Image (spheres, rainbow, N blue to C red):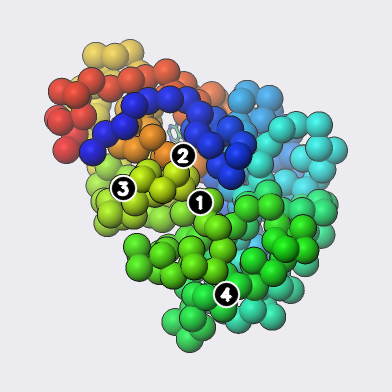
């Protein structure tokens, strides 16, 4: 159930700090560009966006903030939300490359399986772009274990992104499988967790914040877990990174079960 707490995880051969940044509310304002640069300076190494976020403004803002490339940050984006046809995904990848001002996307997820298109075809479109050098690593999002295994027959899947937190545990089987296979599991909505008095009590006792306790629980749940709390606050970025130093005891984990 639990894994040793290490502050880094391996994604396709590169080491990443196990707290990333979700950016679905990022818009093209100077203060948001500055915020992204500050988050990377604070230690964020994985930034999560998608073709659909803020009508493309999230990707464009990241392009402006990170295009100079001196920072060692992996930008993950996603496509195929609502339409997983290969030609749609191919054109969304072209658009994401332009918006992100890059020649290659670090990690590209199929955002959601299209009920009318077999996952093999959607992932195959991403794999084709990987073979052309335009996508470095491939991921899948909102998948069951069965869908993950089908995707893995088409491409090497380095990351899975599903809804998971203290109160939403539907992906337990996927998480255990990812840990066994060395696949990074990226829980979205990591902070939308209940936990109530139990979380607050641990936070007070450990001199931490409730957000740090909830993140520390996720980090402990699996050694390949890499949460991406969404924030527009530089203080919250630092607070969330601070969860890496909070190791929960067995008793604390049991009390949150
Ligand atoms: N694959 C998918 O289908 C999918 C779906 C949804 C989301 N996502 C991704 O997952 C990311 C995370 O999801 P989310 O941002 O919706 O939910 P979340 O990370 O669970 O929660 C974000 C909320 O928590 C607040 N927050 C962040 N750090 C905090 C802290 N230390 N203390 C108190 N409040 C804090 C944020 O407000 P402040 O701005 O005030 O910090 C924001 O209101 C998204 O940004 C997106 O990249 C993926």
The mark closer to the camera, 2 or 4, is 4
Q: Earlier in the sequence, mark 3 or mark 2?
A: 3
Q: Does the Cβ of the disc 3 residue fall within 8 Å of ligand 1?
A: no
The local crowd at label 2, few if under 14, some if 14 to 19, many if 20 or more residues have their Cα within 10 Å, is many
Residue at 60% x, 81% y: name it: 85
Question: Marks 2 and 1, how far apart in space?
Answer: 10 Å
Q: Which mark is residue 189?
A: none
Q: Which mark is residue 226?
A: 2
Classify mark 4: helix, strand or loop.
helix
Q: Residue furthest bottom?
A: 116
- Residue located beneath label 3 in the image: 176
Query: Up-down: is 41 above or below 1?
Result: above
Q: Earlier in the sequence, mark 2 or mark 1?
A: 1
The mark closer to the camera, 3 or 2, is 3
Residue 152 lies left or right of residue 138; in this view the side is: left
Classify mark 1: helix, strand or loop.
strand
Question: Marks 3 and 2, how far apart in space?
Answer: 14 Å
The local crowd at label 1, few if under 14, some if 14 to 19, many if 20 or more residues have their Cα within 10 Å, is many
Q: Earlier in the sequence, mark 2 or mark 4?
A: 4
Question: Marks 4 and 3, how far apart in space?
Answer: 25 Å
Residue placed most toward the observer, 202 or 252 = 252
- Residue located beneath label 1 in the image: 159
Question: Marks 3 and 1, how far apart in space?
Answer: 13 Å
Classify mark 3: helix, strand or loop.
helix
Q: Percent position (x, y) of residue 16?
A: 57, 33
């Amino acid at each position: 159930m639990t894994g040793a707490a290490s502050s880094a995880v391996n994604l396709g051969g590169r080491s990443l700090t196990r707290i990333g940044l979700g950016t679905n509310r990022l818009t093209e304002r100077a203060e948001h560009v500055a915020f992204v640069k500050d988050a990377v300076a604070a230690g964020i190494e994985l930034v999560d966006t998608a073709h659909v976020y803020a009508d493309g403004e999230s990707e464009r803002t990241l392009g402006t903030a990170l295009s100079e490339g001196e920072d060692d940050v992996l930008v993950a984006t996603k496509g195929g939300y609502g339409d997983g046809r290969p030609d749609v995904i191919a054109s969304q990848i072209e658009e994401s490359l332009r918006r992100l001002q890059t020649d290659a996307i670090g990690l590209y997820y199929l955002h959601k399986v299209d009920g009318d298109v077999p996952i093999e075809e959607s992932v195959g479109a991403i794999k084709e772009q990987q073979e052309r050098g335009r996508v470095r690593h491939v991921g899948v999002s909102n998948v069951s274990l069965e869908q993950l295994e089908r995707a893995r027959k088409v491409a090497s899947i380095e990351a899975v992104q599903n809804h998971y937190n203290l109160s939403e545990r539907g992906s337990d089987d996927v998480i255990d499988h990812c840990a066994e296979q060395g696949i990074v599991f990226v829980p979205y909505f990591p902070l939308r967790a209940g936990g109530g008095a139990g979380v607050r009590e641990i936070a007070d006792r450990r001199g931490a914040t409730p957000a740090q306790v909830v993140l520390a629980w996720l980090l402990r749940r699996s050694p390949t877990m890499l949460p991406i709390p969404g924030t527009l606050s530089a203080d919250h970025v630092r607070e969330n990174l601070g969860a890496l130093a909070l190791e929960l005891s067995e008793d604390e984990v049991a009390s949150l079960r």
